[in-house]
Amino acid sequence: MEVESKEWILAQYVSEGVPTSEHLKLRTSNLKIPKDVGPDDHVMLRLHWLSVDPYLRAKMSSQQDGLYLSQFHLNQAEVVESNRSGLSFGEIVMHPFAPMAEYCVAPASLLRKIDPHSGVSVLDYLSALGIPGFAAWVGIVVLGDPKPGENVFISAAAGGVGALAGQLAKLKGCRVVGSVGSDVKVKFLKEEIGYDEAFNYNVETDYDAALSKYFPKGIDIYFDNVGGRMLEAVLNHVNSHARIPLCGMISQYNKVWTEREGVRNLLNMVGKEVRMEGFMLASYLNRFGEFLEEMMGYVKQRKIVSKHKIYHGIESFLESFGSLFTSSNVGKVMLQVNEDAKA
């Protein structure tokens, strides 16, 4: 079987700033797996939905720092050719390392089938039941270890991970406040997601004053998605034995390390006995089943909801990726590769 596939390639490393068409190029190639000579246990996939995530920026730099190892990147696809028993034409699967393309060939061992009768949208498998949900769960449930009545702060709170992290903290009985980049997102968090409070950091630009206002009793858990000035401000408001799971630092991704903002008040962590911990999901794969069971229950009961920002066509990848570094999106950014992809 031979197909024509459009795919994005990295033509030039991105030393700083948001990637442009100078760095990422769209090309067309022919993909072929002769039925009789294709690699054993491989399948050809037609990609339906692609997850667009900030961590991809770290893979476009010539410098290996910060994240070092890439997180998993779950995308949803349909089997169109299979040399593997157990996978059949038309089945919907998840692929953790799919390229930004219309078609690809993948080892069957990497793929996870989606149950079409589970009563869950395939988009939820890319959000609440995928890497965003797993990141939120590890950060809040495992590392944050929330107790009822504790005060939780989430930055980038309207994004794919932040919105889920806040909902998990609420389900654990916490008071939750989020920071976002627009008044529309403030309204979304309070009216649709159930945050107790939220503020627009582009309006309330004195972060220290904002945190004094929203956390008069201090912060017990800070789920950090942005780093920089916000992280520094948080350290002035932490309670004793506060926990700070470091999920990402999107405010720093587009800068070389010598131009990133340092944190000057780390000494506060000593006196308050604060635990700050970065995490990569590969280290917690042994708990993925536990996460999936808990989160699946929440999704089916509508106790956890996801919002999706969908871009259409493989040609839209550059636009969708650039949007991650603005305040234009609410929810999880996804790319619908073909028109007949079902949600």
Image (tube, rainbow, N blue to C red):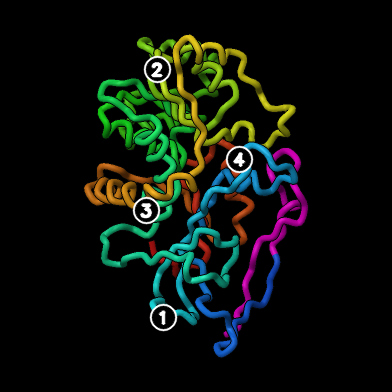
Residue 332 placement (x, y as % from top left): 46, 46
Residue tagged 4: 67
In what element is the residue under mark 2? strand
- Above or below, comparing residue 130 to residue 116 in the picture: above
Earlier sequence position, callout 1 versus callout 4? 4
Percent across and percent down for residue 190 are 34, 30
Q: SS class of the residue under badge 4?
A: loop
**Cα separation between marks 1 and 4:** 37 Å
Q: Secondary structure at mark 1?
A: loop
- In the picture of the structure, the residue carrying the numbered disc 2 is 241
Work out how far the residue at label 4 is from the one at label 3, CA to CA, in angstroms: 25 Å
Say which label, 3 or 2, has the lower sequence index.
Answer: 3
Mark 4 is on which residue type? Leu
Residue placed at 62% from the left, 14% from the top? 264
Query: What's the distance in space between the residues labelled 3 and 1, CA to CA?
Result: 27 Å
Write down the residue under mark 3: 124
The one nearer the camera, 131 or 192, is 131
3D distance between C-alphas at marks 3 and 2? 34 Å
| Mark 2–mark 4 distance (CA, rounded to whole Å) | 26 Å
Regarding residue 331, the answer to whether it shows in the image is: no
Closer to the chain start, of discs 3 and 1, is: 1
In the rendered image, which residue does mark 1 sit on?
Answer: 85
Q: Position of residue 270 (x, y in %)?
A: 50, 13
Residues marked 1 and 4 touching at CB (< 8 Å)? no
Asked if residue 121 lies left or right of residue 6, the reply is left
Task: Label 3, secondary structure: give it.
Answer: helix
Q: Earlier in the sequence, mark 2 or mark 4?
A: 4
